[in-house]
Image (cartoon, rainbow, N blue to C red):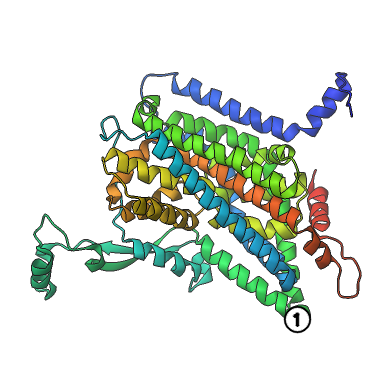
Amino acid sequence: MSRKFSCSPKAIKELIHANLLPILTVSGVTGGAVLGLILRYSREEHWTKREVMYVGYIGELFLRALKALIIPLIVSSLVSAIGSLDLSLSKKIGLRAIAYYMTTTVLAVILGIILVVSIHPGKGSDEGIKKAGEARDVYTPDLLMDLLRNLFPPNLIQACFETHKTIIIQPKLKDLENDTRKEEWIRKYNWTEGTLPPKAEWELGTEHTRALNIMGLVSFATLLGLALSTLGAKGKPLLDFFHSLSDASMVITSWLIWISPVGILFLVASMIIEMEDFSVMLGQLGLYFGTVILGIFIHGFLILPAIYTIFTRKLPFRFLANMSQAYITAFATASSSGTMPVTFQCLEEKNKIDPRVTRFVIPIGATINMDGTALYEAVAAIFIAQVRGIALTIGQVVAISITATAAAIGAAGIPQAGLVTMVMVLDVVGLPAEDMTLIIAVDWLLDRFRTMINVLGDSIGAGLVYELSKKELEQMSINANGDVERPSNEIAMDAVESSKM
Ligand code: ASP
């Protein structure tokens, strides 16, 4: 079938009109890059933090508005999606989503390991690698237990702004003057000020960091949704409330999306002014950077689309192109949770994915499904071992893959969360947390790329689960009397349409 392209002014106008948002967004990114480069090279001296803040100020406002939507969106979409599902049918949808998350994360880790072992970016010396920053002391079992603790927040209000963190405090010989453990430790561990007892013996402490506990909110919203779905008519008023909240959040999202090109422009400009010298990209750090980028692009643009095509028998190009607004926002914000409103919008409005799937798959995916992060964790840990000249055994490589998967699941969808959970991966091969500082210089940029792939992975997951679950979704739409309910995506779409000015 041949299609005629016309170049008449009317056709061009229509084309621009139909693609106005992507055109504006790409212009935002390019404009931001040009502005950033002009400002950066317009003078000799460094830009101060305050000046960078001024340049990025409009972007910061956009980001704050986007973040404000995270709580209402996550909670309302999960409760309304799970609450209105027929449990016997939704179990299948849920299992498909989990199978997809796990398989793709493991594939990403394996790909990362193959690449880092064959490219071998670490040359056995840390010369030329910039050291910066400080790492915190951690003990892997504590990190894993914190993951579960955060899944069960004791106070929901607190979960909206604080996350639990266990800290361990290094004991000092001089602080233990009257402590009965002193003699025992000196004997048992041959302890002097230079050596230390194992981390399991350090003092335990608790800290609450100022960060949204997304895991906790996701688990509570899931439970509430499940409870409402079993309550039937009695649960309907509350369920309607969450439906309505979720639709209203989507309407606000659609407004925000129209101002996103301006926000993105200033975010990209400030990022360029702030970034480290390009010279750190040369040498082995550059090779490490290249290995991670190669891996996440192979994974995101070859493996994941291939999985989509194999299972759905559909070409992925249009689907992927329709998501571009979400990738660009992910790159600009470095946060998959922050990008979530845009991800919903692209999936539901452009790719016409049923919200009963997106509202279920995306909030959970944005929290636990991070293919880009998983690949990066594995590459980074092995790269550091290579720099330190440590030859890893097969057992250690397997241990890295398992912890890299856990570290990616545990990382929150916020900027550089992966760097924090990587301490856990380093720990399993006996590398100190301080070694994380070897890769800090390029992490801010890698973070943006891996966030893009994290968002892409969630989106393909939603598309795939939707295609595979059409039968169940149709059945759910036929209510008990045999009437066909109006699919909730049409209702949500109407709300967004009527909100457009
Ligand atoms: N910034 C990433 C995200 O939000 C997480 C990470 O890898 O640090 O998806």
From the top left corner, tell me how far across and down residue 290 is, in percent: 45, 32
Residue nearest the viewer, comparing 149 with 395: 395
Instruction: Look at the picture and state if 44 lies above or below 404.
Output: above
Q: Does residue 437 appear in this view?
A: no
From the top left corner, tell me how far across and down residue 102 is, in percent: 55, 57
**Residue drawn at 43 percent across, 34 percent down:** 289
Q: Does residue 434 appear in this view?
A: yes
Quadrant of the image occupied by residue 79 = bottom right
**Residue drawn at 68 percent across, 40 percent down:** 320
Q: Residues within 10 Å of mark 1 (few under 14, many from 20)?
A: few
From the top left corner, tell me how far across and down residue 310 is, in percent: 70, 46
Instruction: Specify the amino acid type for callout 1.
Output: Lys
Instruction: Look at the picture and state if 286 lies above or below 439.
Output: above
Which residue, given by chain and number where applicable, does mark 1 sit on?
234
Is 355 displayed left or right of 293 in the figure? right
From the top left corner, tell me how far across and down residue 199 is, in percent: 24, 63
Residue nearest the viewer, comparing 20 with 194: 194
Quadrant of the image occupied by residue 469 = bottom right
Q: Determine the secondary structure under disc 1.
A: helix
Is 485 displayed left or right of 116 in the figure? right
